[in-house]
Amino acid sequence: MTAPHPYTRYIAIGDSLSEGLGDPSPAGGHRGWADRLAEILAGHQPGLTYANLAVRGKTAAQIRAEQLGPAIELEPDLVTVTAGMNDLVRSGFDAASVVAEVEEMFVRLTASGARVAIMTFPDLGKVSPLARRVLPRIVDLNTRLRATAERHGVAVLDVFPHPVTTDPRLWSDDRLHTSPLGHARIASGMAHVLGLPDHADWTDPLPPRPPVPVLRAVGTEVRWAVDFLGPWLWRRLRGRSSGDGCSAKRPEPGPVTLSA
């Protein structure tokens, strides 16, 4: 079989999105879109090896400082980067500073010879009403990321324009992380951006949902506030991060086992 892509070593760096939160693995831990993308790549290139250095809760500056060097040392020919979400929700957010950190990653990764890919952010206000206030930040950050990626020849999975990316079924109950279906769509979208065949349908809408009774909708909002919003705010007030004490789930490149 002729491989439709040239990649033999794929490294993922980033935050909880790349770590795979919201997508439990049958073997324990988290699967996520990067694992799923590695499986897609390995299906066409059986010799592919894959490492995932992403850690939940990390800001763009932390990803650059802690993951970039180790990623380059692994000599990848493909690197995906997810960074900026944990910056977006902080009070001191500065888009220019975040993009400067991301651009440094682009510069060093592309100089190493790796193909680099990123993704934009969806309209989170359509996922959680409390996130509507960050829409101007998202638009600004996405615009800067697209321009920076273009300057450095970085591939972009642009999720913002596509309505399906804010369908609640693509998001986990906490509304911060994508669901297994959401991770699958991201993996398919990234495969499409990288030129693999048979993944152009990643933007297809899901079937219509039945209407939700008002009382049930209100109850869902209350449970979300108690179970997820409250604990998240408490961590912020204490200056804690969900990534404190966590390490990379797959720090060394290894072969990819294809799911049945």
Image: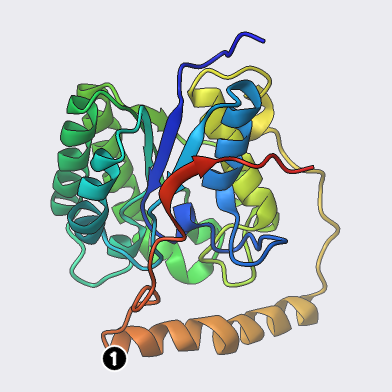
> Residue at 23% of width from left, 33% of height from top?
109
Where is residue 205 shown, x and y percent of the image?
Answer: 71, 38
Q: Where in the figure is residue 243, as x and y percent of width and height?
A: 37, 73
Measuring from the top left, give residue 54's x and y in whole percent: 39, 56
67 versus 255 height, above or below: below
Q: Residue at x 37, y 65 (%)?
A: 133
Q: Residue furthest right?
A: 210
**Left or right placement of residue 100 versus residue 87 in this view:** left
Left or right: residue 180 compared with residue 133: right
Image quarter in which the N terminus is found:
top right
Q: Out of 131 and 53, give the one closest to the viewer.
A: 53
- Image check: 183 left or right of 34? right
Label 1 crowd bin: few (<14), some (14–19), many (20+), radius 10 Å: few
Residue at left 19%, top 45%? 99
Query: Relative to residue 181, is residue 223 depicted above or below?
Result: below
Residue situated in front as seen by the camera: 233 or 9? 9
Amino acid carrying label 1: it is Arg
Q: Quadrant of residue 220?
A: bottom right
Q: Secondary structure at mark 1?
A: loop
